[in-house]
Amino acid sequence: MSHPAHHHKINYVEFPSQDLVKTKAFFAQVFGWTFTDYGPEYAAFSGAGMDGGFYQSSYQSRTANGATLAVLYSAELEKTLTAVEQAGGEILQPIFSFPGGRRFHFAEPGGSELAVWSDPV
């Protein structure tokens, strides 16, 4: 069955993880994502606004290496930053302003970089 409303739209995204167990625990704790395991080297996620997955890899998705940056939204940026730190995430860029609002970048425990943005103060 086709989904005409989704034609040519980004439908799924996959990230590398150096530690799938820690990655899944981190995103479940901080962002409330749920996971379905497909063998020991792949886990699909849902509850993120877009479905996707993490695959076991020795690589990291980092903007310094030219990777695409996935950016999540938070209505409470400071609280989200604290939750990221408490769950074992590494803050790569603390909160800063940009023309559309404020954001920070972090590495999840599996090594991949993501960002979280919020509206201007």
Image: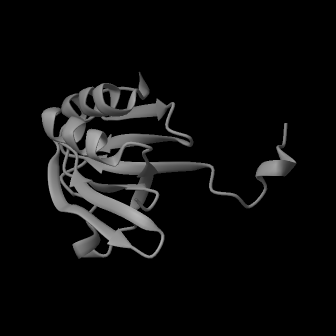
Residue in the image at 42% along x and 45% along y:
74
Residue in the image at 49% along x and 42% along y:
52
Q: In the rendered view, would you say 8 is above or below 25?
A: below
- Give whichever of 70, 84 is nearer the camera: 84
- Give whichever of 45, 82 is nearer the camera: 82
Judge left or right: residue 18 versus residue 117: left
Judge left or right: residue 118 versus residue 103: right
Residue in the image at 28% along x and 39% along y:
79
Q: Quadrant of the N terminus?
A: top right
Residue farthest to the front?
121
Residue in the image at 32% along x and 55% along y:
114
Residue 76, picture quadrant:
top left
Judge left or right: residue 88 versus residue 83: left
- Colour style of the rendered protein structure: one colour
Q: In the rendered view, would you say 91 is above or below 63?
A: above
Residue 37 makes an appearance in the image: no
Residue 17, picture quadrant:
top left
Residue 14, percent across and down? 43, 49
Q: Quadrant of the C terminus?
A: bottom left
Residue 36 makes an appearance in the image: yes
Residue 11, percent across and down? 63, 49
Judge left or right: residue 64 versus residue 68: left
